[in-house]
């Protein structure tokens, strides 16, 4: 059971990264950052992007980004967003 | 109260305000009893959910209210805008205690809020803001100067953009704290009745719980949420303003004769009104589209709101200019309604994102559209 869950989670992370990469590529075109790049620091995104990203993540994965989720560790890179989404989703499913 | 009666009330209120708006503009202030009446009627922050003391109205209902107010008095619409901006920021990024403390008070109008971001060296580029928030005993020490704060002269609390250790922060600063200086502004081009003020914060100490969101997110998330909400209400206000100008122009040319010919009989006048109708209708549809996307929390809602605001402000600007032209000398008189709309409409192309940066954001939006389902 434990192994199965962990396998499913790994798959989910890849899907989440893919989904977020797609959103980034639609937002920044050719210059899609590496999953570990800090896209804010790289200046890749405009002043509307931060909110668009939050809204997109919420809608796509059916979760709510609360103010306590809003820290730099969660949103600076695509991989961190994916980890955050996985964590939020496991929180939700764990509670049900 | 149903949604439709709330809107009917707002329309009726706006109609009565229309009679007074010229006088408010001339005297440079909406009377405070009118500000209280707006709050008492439940017209502030109508989109705040019921669980936080609001009416839980949809974006479309909020929009219609702003159109009704915008068609009477842009300063009145500005009151709804600034209260809504601060409420939206606290609703989205406030913690449980901040929401409980501020949202019912903002929705009831018990507290008047204003948004303080612009500085002498930071307009469109708000990342250049130099107001500082420094950790100190008892919370944060705020120091800096803010300009063009709509309803800043009568607000009880300001949502202030500052920097903490170089990171953007959004801080609620109550107007009655020691070190807050309010300098009312008069004689500006438009929005004359909107109690504009410049603010000075001289080492104003606020408790830590006045910080909204974590350091680093004050601009990209908290202030951005406020501005996004502000763009939406300004856009709808512009729709109302544009439609009011079209109505006034049509009524005038139907009445006014020169050389034995009604102005409405001139083909050029009819053609102009036809083009204006298209612009006003298009602006309204774009605002409705933005409202639908906001209602379902679509990520495109933010860019579509920029688009709607850009189009509506330009429509308001163009139609008010045409209305002044058609009114002739009467349009230039001190008490001219279309003249007031003309001055206010120009301001709409600057506030909550001027035309030029909006075009750049929209260009980026255009570039990423291909391949995205709509």
Image (cartoon, rainbow, N blue to C red):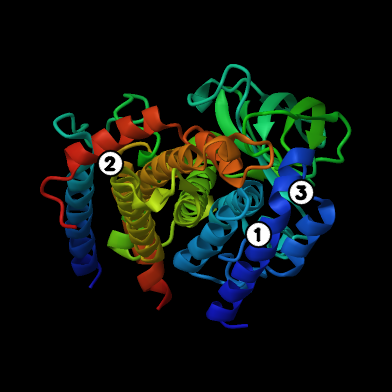
Q: Position of residue B134 (x, y in %)?
A: 71, 26
Report whether residue A47 is seen: yes
Q: Quadrant of the C terminus of chain B?
A: bottom left
Relative depth, front residue between B144 and B286: B286
Q: Specify whether disc 2 shares its chain with disc 1.
A: no
Name the residue tied to disc 3. B30
Which element carries disc 3, helix, strand or loop? Answer: loop
Residue closest to the far left: B371
Q: Nearer the viewer, mark 3 or mark 2?
A: 3
Which element carries disc 1, helix, strand or loop? Answer: helix
Label 3 marks a residue whose chain is: B
Q: Position of residue A43 (x, y in %)?
A: 33, 25
| Residue depicted at x 54% and y 78% | B3
Name the residue tied to disc 1. B99
Name the residue tied to disc 2. A78
Relative depth, front residue between B269 and B229: B269
């Amino acid at each position: 059971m434990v192994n199965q869950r962990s396998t499913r989670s790994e798959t989910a992370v890849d899907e989440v990264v893919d989904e977020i990469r797609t959103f980034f590529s639609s937002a920044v075109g050719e210059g899609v950052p590496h999953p570990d790049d800090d896209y804010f620091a790289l200046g890749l995104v405009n002043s509307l992007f931060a909110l668009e990203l939050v809204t997109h993540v919420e809608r796509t994965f059916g979760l709510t980004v609360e103010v306590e989720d809003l820290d730099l560790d969660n949103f600076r890179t695509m991989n961190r967003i994916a980890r955050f989404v996985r964590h939020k989703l496991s929180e939700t499913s764990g509670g049900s | 109260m149903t949604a439709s009666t709330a809107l009917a009330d707002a329309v009726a209120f706006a109609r009565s305000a229309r009679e007074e708006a010229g006088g408010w503009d001339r005297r440079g202030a909406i009377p405070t009893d009118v500000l209280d009446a707006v709050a008492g009627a439940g017209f502030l922050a109508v989109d705040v959910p019921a669980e936080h003391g609001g009416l839980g109205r949809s974006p479309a209902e909020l929009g219609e209210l702003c159109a009704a107010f915008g068609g009477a008095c842009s300063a009145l619409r500005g009151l709804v805008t600034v209260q809504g901006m601060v409420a939206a920021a606290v609703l989205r990024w406030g913690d449980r205690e901040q929401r409980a403390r501020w949202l019912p008070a903002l929705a009831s109008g018990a507290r008047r809020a204003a948004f303080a971001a612009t500085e002498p060296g930071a307009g469109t580029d708000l990342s250049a803001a130099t107001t500082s928030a420094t950790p100190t005993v008892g919370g944060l020490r705020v120091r800096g100067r803010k300009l063009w704060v709509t309803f800043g002269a009568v607000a009880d609390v300001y949502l202030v953009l500052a920097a903490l250790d170089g990171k953007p922060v959004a801080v609620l600063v109550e107007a009655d704290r020691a070190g807050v200086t309010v300098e009312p502004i008069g004689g500006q081009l438009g929005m004359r009745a909107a109690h504009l003020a410049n603010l000075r914060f001289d080492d104003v100490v606020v408790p830590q719980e006045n910080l909204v969101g974590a350091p680093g997110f004050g601009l990209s998330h908290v202030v951005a949420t406020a501005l996004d909400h502000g763009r939406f209400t300004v856009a709808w206000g512009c729709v109302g303003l544009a439609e009011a100008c079209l109505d006034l122009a049509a009524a005038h040319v139907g009445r006014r004769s020169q050389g034995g010919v009604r102005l409405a009989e001139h083909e050029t006048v009819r053609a102009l009104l036809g083009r204006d109708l298209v612009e006003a209708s298009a602006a309204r549809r774009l605002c409705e589209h933005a409202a639908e996307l906001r209602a379902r929390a679509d990520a495109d809602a933010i860019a579509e709101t920029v688009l709607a605001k850009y189009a509506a402000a330009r429509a308001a600007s163009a139609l008010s200019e045409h209305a002044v032209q058609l009114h002739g000398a009467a349009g230039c008189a001190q008490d001219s309604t279309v003249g007031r709309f003309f001055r206010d409409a120009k301001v709409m192309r600057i506030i909550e994102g001027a035309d030029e940066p909006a075009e750049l954001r929209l260009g980026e939006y255009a570039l990423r559209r291909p391949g995205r389902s709509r």
